[in-house]
Each structure stands twice: as C-alpha cells, then as structure tokens.
Image (tube, coloured by chain):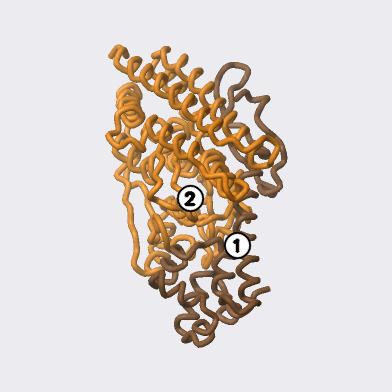
Chain colours: A orange, B brown
C-alpha cells in the first residue's frame, strides 16, 4: 500500500548534477521545496581540487566541487534530516534491504557506478563510482529510477542495478543507500547561507594544501605549462582533453558548477533579502563564461583547429585563478558585512 | 551564459538525452535550460572514448600476434585499466599483468576465469574471443 503511495506521489525533476539533484528531489518529496542550486550552495559544495597523485586511467583527478557525499552530509547537518546511510558486505543483503525500504514506502538514494547503468548513453559510461540516483518503486524485476541527470524517470533491471551498486575501484559504493528518517524542519536561510558562504570562501582561499582552492588552479596551470610535446602532442592533447572533460561532463563540471553557484547566490539574496549577493552572482556568471572560453580554446587545440600551445592555456588558467581569488574575497567580505 | 546562448549543437554521443544547464534568462535570473549538447563536450568525450578504443585495437593486434592474452583486450573494451581490473577481480596487479601472458592465460583455472568474467560483465566463454 505504502509502496503504491510513494509511486504515485513522487515527482521527477531534471537536474544538472546528480548529488544536488537527488537531495533536492528527496527534500521536495519530504515537503521542503529546495532547488538544486540551493542544495548545492547551502552544502558548500563548490570547490577546486587538483590531485596529481590520484590517477584516473593515468590522468590526475581534477575536481570542480567537493568530494562525493559532501552535499548529502552537508545538508544532513544543516537541516537535521536524520539521514541514515547503509553499506553492505553482501550483494544479496544490499538488494533485500532496498526492497524492504521501498515496501515501507521510503524514497531511497543510491550510490552507483555510472558505467553499469544501461539507460545512460554508452559514450558517457565511464567507471565513475559516485553517481547518485533515487529509487521510488519496483515492478517485478525492474526498479523505477529517478536519475536527476535524465530528463524523465527510467527503469533499471535488478541485475544491472545490483552490479552498479557493488562496482569496485576508487570510491567503491559498497551498495551504499540512504534515506531520511524525519521531515526537514523549517530553516533559517540567512543563518544557513552565511555559514555556507564562510565555508566555501575558506576552502577556496585558505586551505592549507596548495592543491585545493584557488591555489590548486595555479598548480594545474603549472602542470599544463610543462606538458611535453615530444610524441606529436598526443599525450598533451589527452591531458588537456581530460581537464575539459572533468570540467564539462562529469556532473557538469567547472563552468556548470560556477553557474549553479551563481543561481544559489541569487536565490539566497531573494530568500534573505540581502541584495549584495545578486551582484556577486552576476560576477560569477562572467567567471563561468571564462571557464567555457578555456574549454573552447582547449577543444580547438585538440581538434587541430588551433596550434597546440599549452602555455596559452596555462595563462588562461592563471587569469581564472586571479579572478576567482578576487571573487571569493569579495564574497567573504559581503558575508561579513551581512546585517543580522 | 545567457539562455539564448545555451548550445544546442546536437551532441550525437548524448543520443536522445538532453542535459540540464544553468543560464541567465531575459529577467536576469538563472534557470535550468535543457541542452542538446555542446561541440566542445562532444570533442573531449569522443577523444576519451576513441583513446580507449585505440588501446583495445592495439591489444587485439598483440593478441593475434601471440604477444598478449585476450584479457588485456577485454580490459580496454570495458574501459578499465590494470588497477581497476585488479580491484574489480580482487587480485594483485602483478597477477593481472601476468595473466596478460598468452601461455599463462591459456591455463587459467576456471575460478579465475569466472572472476574476470564477472568483473568485466562477460560470460566466461567470451573471454577467449577478440572480435
């Protein structure tokens, strides 16, 4: 009975990024209208990280946001959602638990490997183990899935979902599932927003490790500048293609996250009445446009439409680092001047 | 990015899907707009896919020349590298590399073949073929 009610009442929404989309849908289902952008911003998910010692198919990890899980746990903390997380040793136990939760009428979030999800276009299926989605029902051997990055709801066979939940490798999900145990309480957006801005400014400007935040962008610039061009530039082209791929495709990367954060600033300005954030949103949109220009310049080099000159790309990255540094300083200043 | 500038450059790799992107509308507010794709994205995705396909074809040539085992070919076909295949199969990396030797692969015990097949999403019999 409850299972049928969940199926009837659940509403899917197309989102830009899986984790923020999942949290937005989960909260809306529990009665709190929170946009994807607000979910992203309030959990201080914007970041930059260049981690050369973590290798993905031989290339460094470049992230334009906080690590997977940060949005869920950030909102869980801020909004006191009482989220429960469970992982499993055995596949069977993991699937049985999912079924039991669905039978009890729970909307369940899952961490999966995007490679094993058959409804994702083949070209986008790489071994990325932290793709989030929601399951809102089951029909025989098929699960009813709301994947935020898909335009509509989809179906996924039991065996495929099982494989995706128990994939191995970096960030192995181990069948991880999560659900909320109490409805979200009424929140003080101003207070939550101020805390979120403080954390994001601190991450971008003051992380002790130079690979994180604005300084990370400069380290990336340095590694781009030093790319060897001996093998006709093949390795260098793969490297810069990888930067753009991390930026644009995996969870709508650099520019996408900057635009989403700008949307958050606009919404926070409207919700709290603090208009200074509106101007900052406009500036961040311009920075996002610069990131897109960078991607375009890189793609032209990859396609041999422009000469391969990594130092030119490094120069663009340094400019971006400078602009973001100014931006996050002003954001921090505005946060401090916020009357409350 | 303005709403009217959202790229709709029909990225074939997205198949029938559209991506949600944020763009500024005429009222100055950001909102979600569905995009059919951006050529830049298609370029870098295609580059990564083709790189792995090239690796698989090179491995295939080595297999046919008797210099490598089909396991290496299937690893690239599944978009994996040695580190990931080793983790997925629950073996040490050096063992996976050893199984790239045709003579070692030829007498691989059934339980290891099954582990590789499960890790790669194949039937055990398909492990021997390089089509």
- For residue A59, the mark is 2
Give the quadrant of the N terminus of chain B: top right
Q: Secondary structure at mark 1?
A: helix
- Residue sitting at x 60%, y 53%: A120
Q: Chain of mark 2?
A: A
B56 shown above or below A288: below
The span from disc 1 to disc 2 (Cα, nearest Å) is: 15 Å
Give the quadrant of the C terminus of chain B: bottom right
- Residue sitting at x 54%, y 58%: A115
Q: Quadrant of residue B67?
A: bottom right
A180 shown above or below A280: below
Front residue of A302/A62: it is A302
- Residue A188, x across and y down, in percent: 32, 25
- Residue sitting at x 61%, y 78%: B126
Q: Residues within 10 Å of mark 1 (few under 14, many from 20)?
A: some
Left or right, residue A212 beside residue A302: left
């Amino acid at each position: 009975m409850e299972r049928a009610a969940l199926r009837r009442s659940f509403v899917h929404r197309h989102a830009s990024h899986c984790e923020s989309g999942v949290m937005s849908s989960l909260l809306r289902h529990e009665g709190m209208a929170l946009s994807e952008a607000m979910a992203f911003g309030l959990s201080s998910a914007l970041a930059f990280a260049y981690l050369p010692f973590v290798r993905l198919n031989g290339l460094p990890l470049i992230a334009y946001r906080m690590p997977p899980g940060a949005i869920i746990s950030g909102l869980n903390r801020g909004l006191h959602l009482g989220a429960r997380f469970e992982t499993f040793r055995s596949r069977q136990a993991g699937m049985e638990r999912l079924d039991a939760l669905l039978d009890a009428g729970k909307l369940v979030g899952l961490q999966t490997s995007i490679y094993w999800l058959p409804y994702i276009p083949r070209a986008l299926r790489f071994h990325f183990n932290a793709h989030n989605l929601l399951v809102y029902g089951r029909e025989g051997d098929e699960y009813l899935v709301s994947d935020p990055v898909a335009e509509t709801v989809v179906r996924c066979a039991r065996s495929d979902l099982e494989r995706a939940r128990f994939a191995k490798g970096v960030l192995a999900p181990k069948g991880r599932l999560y659900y909320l145990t109490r409805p979200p309480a009424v929140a003080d957006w101003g207070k939550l927003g101020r805390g979120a801005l403080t954390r994001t400014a601190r991450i971008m400007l003051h992380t002790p490790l130079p690979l994180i935040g604005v300084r990370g962008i400069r380290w990336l610039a340095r590694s781009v500048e030093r790319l060897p061009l001996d093998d006709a530039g093949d390795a260098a082209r793969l490297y810069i293609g990888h930067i753009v791929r991390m930026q644009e495709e995996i969870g709508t990367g650099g520019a996408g996250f900057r635009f989403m954060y700008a949307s958050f600033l606009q919404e926070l300005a409207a919700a709290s009445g603090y208009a200074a954030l509106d101007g900052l949103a406009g500036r961040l949109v311009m920075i996002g446009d610069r990131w897109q220009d960078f991607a375009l310049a890189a793609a032209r080099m990859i396609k041999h439409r422009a000469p391969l000159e990594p130092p030119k790309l490094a120069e663009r990255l340094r400019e971006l680092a400078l602009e973001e540094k100014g931006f996050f300083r002003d954001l921090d200043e505005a946060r401090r001047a916020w009357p409350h | 990015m303005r709403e009217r500038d959202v790229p709709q450059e029909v990225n074939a790799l997205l198949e029938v899907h559209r991506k949600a992107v944020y763009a500024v509308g005429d009222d100055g507010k950001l909102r979600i707009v569905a995009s059919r794709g951006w050529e830049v994205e298609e370029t870098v995705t295609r580059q990564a896919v083709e790189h792995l396909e090239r690796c698989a074809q090179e491995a295939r040539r080595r297999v046919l020349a008797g210099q490598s085992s089909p396991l290496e070919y299937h690893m690239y076909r599944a978009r994996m590298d040695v580190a990931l295949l080793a983790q997925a199969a629950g073996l040490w990396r050096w063992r996976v590399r050893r199984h790239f030797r045709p003579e070692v692969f030829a007498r691989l015990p059934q339980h290891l073949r099954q582990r590789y097949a499960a890790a790669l999403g194949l039937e055990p019999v398909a492990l021997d073929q390089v089509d």
